[in-house]
Image (cartoon, rainbow, N blue to C red):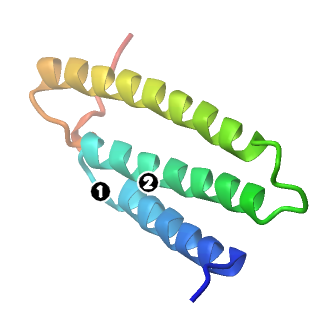
Amino acid sequence: MTPTLTLFLIVSAALFCIGLLAALSRRHAIFILIGIEMMLAAANLNFIAFWRFGAEPQQPTGVMVAIFSIAIAAAEAAVGVALVIAVYRHYRTTNVTKLDRLKG
């Protein structure tokens, strides 16, 4: 069986839906970050799939966009984990429903 664009789009949509469900249904900040990373991985899969099955896939524009997106996702994860650690040190929990007392 040869993979087609439709197969990649279905896998990407499933991955995005799982990430969205994880980000919206979880109470702990780490699981929310994992869900966001899954959604970014689905977007990267779309970039690569549309580049591969495009009219002229000689220029690696889809790969470049995906690499740029991965770099942004890594920076987002680093900042997110740093925020979670700072909040955990202050409140001793990562449960986002208990964080209603944040003041600047």
Q: Which class describes the residues within 10 Å of circle 2: few (<14), some (14-19), or many (20+)?
A: many
Q: Which residue is more in the foreground, 26 or 70?
A: 70
Task: Please state which of residues 32 and 15 is positioned toward the viewer in this rendering.
Answer: 15
Sequence-first tag of 2 and 1: 1
Q: Helix or strand or loop: what does disc 2 sit on?
A: helix
Q: Residue at x 50, y 51 (%)?
A: 41
- Crowdedness near tag 1: few (<14), some (14–19) or many (≥20) residues, C-alpha within 10 Å: some
Q: Position of residue 75 (x, y in %)?
A: 46, 24
Q: Residue at x 19, y 37 (%)?
A: 94
Above/below status of 19 relative to 89: below
Would residue 61 be found to the left or right of residue 25 on screen?
A: right
Q: Quadrant of residue 59?
A: top right
Q: CA distance from mark 2 to mark 1?
A: 14 Å
Q: Disc 1 marks which residue?
A: 26
Give the residue at mark 2.
Answer: 38
In the displayed orientation, state which residue is furthest to the top: 104
Report the quarter where the C terminus lies.
Answer: top left
Quarter in which the N terminus is drawn: bottom right
Instruction: Give above or below for 76 relative to 86.
Output: below
Q: Residue at x 30, y 27 (%)?
A: 81
**Which residue is most to the right?**
55
Q: Residue furthest left?
A: 92
In this view of the protein, which residue sits in the foreground, 78 or 91? Answer: 78
Q: Nearer the viewer, residue 50 or 55?
A: 55
Q: Is residue 104 left or right of residue 12?
A: left
**Residue 12: x %, y % from top left:** 56, 67
Name the spot of residue 14 as percent of width and height, x first: 50, 73
Tell me the quarter of the picture where residue 98 sits.
top left
Q: The residue under label 2 is which amino acid type?
A: Met
